Image (cartoon, rainbow, N blue to C red):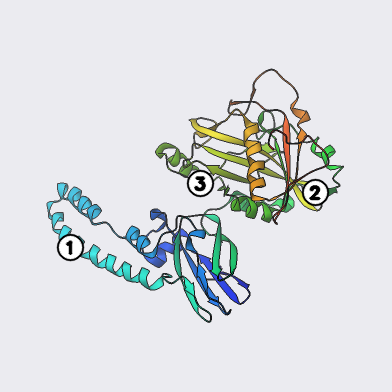
Amino acid sequence: MKRAQTQTQDGVTVTLAVLSNKEAKKFFGTSLAKREIQPVWLEIDNRSKIPYFLIPRNMDPNYYSAEEATYRAHFRQTRQFLEAGLIAIFFFPALAMIPVNYFMIRRANHKMDKVFEDVSMHRFAIMPGETHSGFLYTSVDQGTKHVKVDLLGEGTRKIFDFVVPIPGIKPDYTTKDLADRYPGVKNVDYLEKELPEQLAKIPSCTTDKKGKHNGDPINLIVIGELEDLVTIFTSAGWDETSSLTMGSGFAMAKAFFTGDNDRYSPISPLYYEGHSHDIAFQKNRGNINQRLHFRLWYTPMRYEKKPVWVGAISRDIGVKFTLKTWYMTTHRIDQNVDDSRDYLLEDLMEAQKVSRYAFIENKALGATSKPRKNLTNDPYFTDGRRLVIEISTEVSQLKSFGWGTKAEAVL
C-alpha cells in the first residue's frame, strides 16, 4: 500500500497497487506467478451522482476471474500422489502418506477458496456514494506495468492510466549514473538547424569494450527524458531489460536451453564512447531466441533542453553458442537491420507518440561492396540511414524535422 497510486476525476477516486511476485506469494500462500497470475488491488470511490461500471477486460484482455485464479492456485493432488509413489519405491511406508496428503490438500484448497472469496473484487457496478475494493487478477508483468482502469457511465466514460513500478527485476538503467557519465563535459543545447551537424559526428557503429572492432551500426537517435522513454516504450509494448548479473545471465542461459520465455532477459554489452548501453528495450515472440531490441546511450547533446540518445536497433532471430561470453550464448541478428529501425518508427507512429522524425545519412559508415559484420560475425546490410525521433508524452500528430531524407519507404 505504500506504493499505491491514486487518481481522481469528477468525484471518482481510483486507488491501485500491484503486488510483486514475492508479495503475492506471501499474501496468498502460494506462488501465483508460476500460474501466470499477478494480483492488482483496486479501490473505486464513487462520489459522483451517476453509477459507473468497471470494464475488467480493458485492464487486461487475458485477465482471470477470481474463481479461475483460485482454481489455478490450488494444490494438485495428482502431483502429491506421484511424489509419494516415487518415494515409496525406496521407502514403502511413504504410501501411508497418500490419504493424509489427500485430506490435507482438500483442507488447504478450501481455505484458499475462502481467502480469494474474501479479498477479491466481485462487484463491478459502483453506485453513487459506494466504495468497492479488492483484488483483480491480471497477467504477470515485471519492471513497469501499465494498468488502464476503464469506468463506463451513462453518457460518459472515465479512463485512469496508471504506470506502476513493480519490485522484482533490476532494469539496466537503474544501475547507471548518468549525471557522471561524461565528467568535465558540459551539456550543449542545439538548435534544430545545428543538430544534424552534431549527429553527423557520431561514429558509424558500436564497438567492443576496447573500441577496436565494430559491432552493430548506430542507426537510431531518440530525443526525450529518461522517464518519458520508460513510460512511452513500455506503454507501446516494449519490455525493460534486466541488468546483466550472474543470476540474470544464468536465467537467460536456462531459457535458451529450455525454450522458456524471458521477456526481460539481459542484452549483451556493446560500447559507445567507452561505455555499454544505458538503457535497452525489447519485444520477443514468446521465447528468448527471437526478439526485437534496441540499446540507447546517453549523450551530452540536448535538443530543446531534452537529452539526445544514440542507439542501435536490430532483430534477434536465434541463439547460438559462443565462447565470447561467460554465459556461453549470444543472439544471431536478422541481416536487414533497416526493417527493425523502420518498425520502431511505425510502432510509435501508431501510438501517436512521435513529435518529429527524420532520416539522416550515417556518413561514417561509408560505401562498401563487402558484407558488413558485427562482433559475433553476423552479416548485416543497411541503406545507411539513421532514424531520428523526438518522442512525445502527449498524443501527437506526426511531423518531420526540416532536414534529412523523408521516410517515403516507411510512409
* Residue at image mark 2: 302
Q: Secondary structure at mark 2?
A: strand
* Residue at image mark 1: 100
**Of the residues tagged 1 and 3, which is closer to the observer?**
3
The answer to which of 29 and 123 lies nearer the viewer is 123
Work out which residue is located at the far bottom of the displayed protein and give it: 129
* Residue at image mark 3: 263
Q: Position of residue 236 (x, y in %)?
A: 60, 50
Kind of residue at badge 1: Val
Mark closer to the chain start, 1 or 3: 1
Q: Position of residue 364 (x, y in %)?
A: 77, 29
Residue 69: quadrant of the picture: bottom left
Q: Position of residue 371 (x, y in %)?
A: 64, 20
**Of the residues tagged 2 and 1, which is closer to the observer?**
2
Kind of residue at badge 2: Arg
Q: Is residue 352 left or right of residue 250?
A: right
Q: Count neighbours of disc 2 (C-alpha within 10 A) and say few if under 14, some if 14 to 19, many if 20 or more.
A: some
Q: Secondary structure at mark 3?
A: loop
Per the model, the C-alpha gap separating discs 2 and 3 is 31 Å
Q: Count neighbours of disc 1 (C-alpha within 10 A) and say few if under 14, some if 14 to 19, many if 20 or more.
A: few
Mark closer to the chain start, 2 or 1: 1
Q: Quadrant of the C terminus?
A: top right
Q: Secondary structure at mark 1?
A: helix
Q: Residue 158: which numbered mark, if any?
A: none
Q: Pointers 1 and 3 in contact (CB under 8 A)?
A: no
Q: Count neighbours of disc 3 (C-alpha within 10 A) and say few if under 14, some if 14 to 19, many if 20 or more.
A: many
Residue under the image location 42 percent in, 54 percent down = 36
